[in-house]
Amino acid sequence: MPIGLSSAGVVNSSLEQIASQTRITSLSDGSPAALAASVVYVPTVQLMLRELDPDFARLTAPLALSGAVTPIVPWAFEYLYPDDMVRLRQVRPPGSGTGSLADPNDPVPIRANVAFDTIGSTVTKVILTNQINALAVYTSSQITEVQWDSVFADAVIRRLANPLAMALSGRPDFAEKILMQSAMMAQTAEAVDDSGFRRGPGGT
């Protein structure tokens, strides 16, 4: 991976893939290539994070309770889905001390589901589990290009090339359509994580 890899560097590598003579200095430099890249860059990176689940993007962090009066049945605890979570990998106990419902050395995974609950008047994405004081192991979007490995960088560069080629050939509408299709694929994949539980304003 090149030292000091940046979003502009990734885009320029994609432009090289399509034999474009255009180069950008940043995603906001105002050039046609930068304008096109600014539309597709972040969604493409997040899609690839979800598809590849790279180790460098793995984060373990405590979950915050959602504030719901009662969790969705039959679960004992309901936690907020972290803003930077691209994909939930695992729910873990906080340790082997007091307050943990599970032995961290137990190979049996802790069950959890992603769902939606109406908290107050807002439909909120949550994580349901029977684990008290739960930790989440997940793929995080809070990573920068300098943390990417060479395999991930190459995957993003190649995935960006197609919509950039369409946009720069005078078909930005088609490039946006490709991006929308990719986003739909990501949402379909995310549905695999979701339990299907959804509670409405009435708490049912």
Image: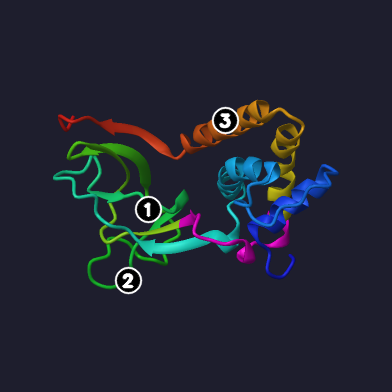
Residue drawn at the location 73% of the way across and 32% of the way down? 166
Q: How is the image coloured?
A: rainbow
Give, as a single range, the part of the protein colored magenta: 138-152
Few, some or many C-alpha atoms within 10 Å of disc 2 (few <14, some 14-19, many ≥20)?
Answer: few
Residue position for label 2: 96
Residue position for label 3: 180
The amino acid sitting under disc 1 is Pro
Residue drawn at the location 68% of the way across and 69% of the way down? 4
Front position among marks 3 and 1 = 3
Residue 197 at what x, y percent from top left? Answer: 31, 33
The amino acid sitting under disc 3 is Met
Disc 3, SS: helix
Looking at this rendering, what residue extends furthest in the front direction?
30
The amino acid sitting under disc 2 is Ser
| Circle number at residue 160 | none
Residue 52 at what x, y percent from top left? Answer: 62, 49
Q: Disc 2 to disc 1, how far (Cα)?
A: 24 Å
| Circle number at residue 82 | 1
Few, some or many C-alpha atoms within 10 Å of disc 1 (few <14, some 14-19, many ≥20)?
Answer: some
